[in-house]
Amino acid sequence: MGWQAITFAFITLFLPEPLLPVGIILSLTGISIAIASILRGRSAWTKFSMLEMWLVFFALLVSQALTNTIGQYLPITLLQSVMIFFALEVSSVCSEFRLQLSRVMSVGDNLPGMEGRLYSSAQAAFKTISRAGLLFASCYVLSLAILYVSTFAPLASPLITDVSLYIVVVSVSLALLLVSRED
Amino acid sequence: MALTKKAVVYLGLAYLFIGFALVFRQPALTIFVIPIALTFFYSSLLSHIQIPNLTITRKLNPLRSFGGETIKVTLEILNNLNVELNELHLEDQVPNSLHLESGSNTFSLSLKPHERTEHFYEISAPRRGQYALGPLKATSMDPMRFRQFSLKIPGQDRVMILPQVEDLGKVDVTARRVGPWPGTVPSRSVGPGTEFFELRLYSPGDELRRINWKASARQARLVTNEFETERVTDVLVALDCSESVLSSVFSFDAEELEVNLAASLCSQLLLQGNRVGLLVYGAERTWVSPAFGKHQLLRILSGLTITKAGRAIIPIDFAVETIVNAVLPARSVIAFISPLMGDAIVEVVRSVAAAGYSVICVTPSIEASTRDEPRSNVLARKILETERRINLRQIASIAKCVEVSPHTSIRVLSRRRFARKLA
């Protein structure tokens, strides 16, 4: 929840002035829904809060695209997107763990051995979150590296333009599709 | 292996970013695809999904229930692999008609090599029937949860929710044919018993307690009481669960009432020492040949558990006469539990009564409908009610009939009616 609040604040902070009130309202609503989802244990509410986060992010992205300032803020916007991905990961792991916890709480002492299983689940959840954090951090660093290469490479060789980055990314996306369909 | 919803969402986002880049002519926007692509590559190339190999044992306690009680399901899960299984999602298939009382049939766990663990949950069934639990669905996912591998581990267990058995008290039946064992059915022969039969002159060797002193004083010679022996008999309970039981004439669940009544009647007749059999005529036709004892009660209750009302394939007269001729000795007792609708049931009762069987008919009573219905429906209901009344009158002339209401306890009914009318 704390991570979601930070991400919301970080996105809202960079919103252009006309969109700021809408961004603040959406962020506050999103944070309230996230708190409520944790208190009530409703995973659907968590999804709704994440959807709001994406909405604010895309509003920021569109506003930057329209004012032609994408290039200027790209490392920050990239960081914001990675933060959202991490928030998604954390919320899905946490809601799953909460579901298990509520199942154990609902049966009380009737289920021997559940405490041990709950402990191992908590450990696994912590491990998953740490791994996701590490993965997204490295993703950000690698993306940033690609970004800088694509920014400075055209200066060295005019043949390599932004369009080449586009071609590279589209190729990566197609490869991605192939990887996901490998089975 | 299949993609998860999460993977589809991530792929959608990737193509959304590419679309944005095209729409706004900003190739730099495609950089947002890189983190998604990297996570996918990590998920696909650097991690792998463990295909689980599990042995599942399911234990149910109790195996049979009379409904309204909690059934504890214990799942024993054994990992047959030499590797650890992480975050395995398991779901034990439970029919929607069963209520989950506590615990959950879906759960996640990690299993060490050859580790054995147990999972518990409790269910209850609101309605009579046979329910299958299982198979268990095991889903294993990659660390990023982009791809999943699901497999069903075969193995089903059945839980039976038996019909309600109520204590009817003593049910008096008469039969032209009785068995050799003592019971509660008057045998029309003199011997040890409880029912007075006749008086006769004292003969040496008669028990003193059987001398009728008043009659002896009147006749000035010793007179003794003779009693009628009571034996057991063979009873076939024929349950008519044909489509007529589903008729809207009945404002209550006539099928359940009939099944519960059949269960209670069979239980009581068996308790009184009779040889009892069952014939169910409905969507699923079953029969249990007559026998004695508690095992027979269990067989009968199991037969009643799977009873479903509906259109039968063969006519009722053929079904009844075939079973009666095959398994029931002549001049025994047949108890029909039927809504008594249609001409066929009257013909069946008439033919078995003519063949020398003692016949009892138990039927659900029709109550005045309180529903707002179109005039045509009211008229149709009245026609059906009249037809049924005519059938009831025809059957009452050849057999003993009892009408049963769902709002009265069967035990109360037995006190009021079975003892008197079924005698």
Image (tube, grey):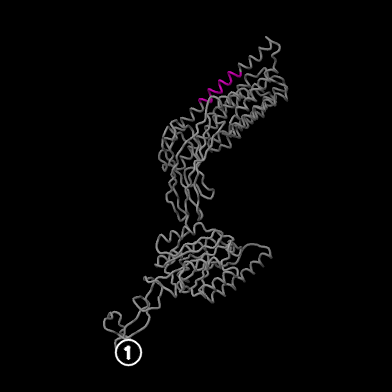
Quadrant for residue B31, please give it: top right
Type of amino acid under label 1? Arg
Quadrant that contains the C terminus of chain B: bottom left
Residue in front for this viewpoint, B43 or B166: B43
Q: Is residue B63 left or right of residue A40?
A: left
What percent of the width, then of the height, locates residue B278? 48, 64
On screen, residue B121 above or below B39? below
Residue A180 position, x and y percent, is 60, 29
- Please count the marks in the image: 1
Query: Quadrant of the rendered structure where residue B291 is?
Result: bottom left
- Please identify the residue farthest to the front as the structure is shown: B326
Q: Position of residue B231 (x, y in %)?
A: 39, 72
**Image-based side of A22 in relation to B408, left or right:** right
Quadrant of the image containing the N terminus of chain B: top right
Residue A141 among magenta residues: yes
Element at badge 1?
helix
The boundaries of the magenta stretch are A130-143
Task: Say left or right for B236 vs B312.
Answer: left
Image mark 1: chain: B
As drawn, the residue found furthest toward the top would be A156
Q: Give the left or right position of residue A156, taking residue B347 as reference.
A: right
What secondary structure is the stretch in magenta mostly built from? helix
Report the front residue among A30 and B29: B29
Residue underneath mark 1: B218
Asked whether B194 or B409 is in front, the reply is: B194
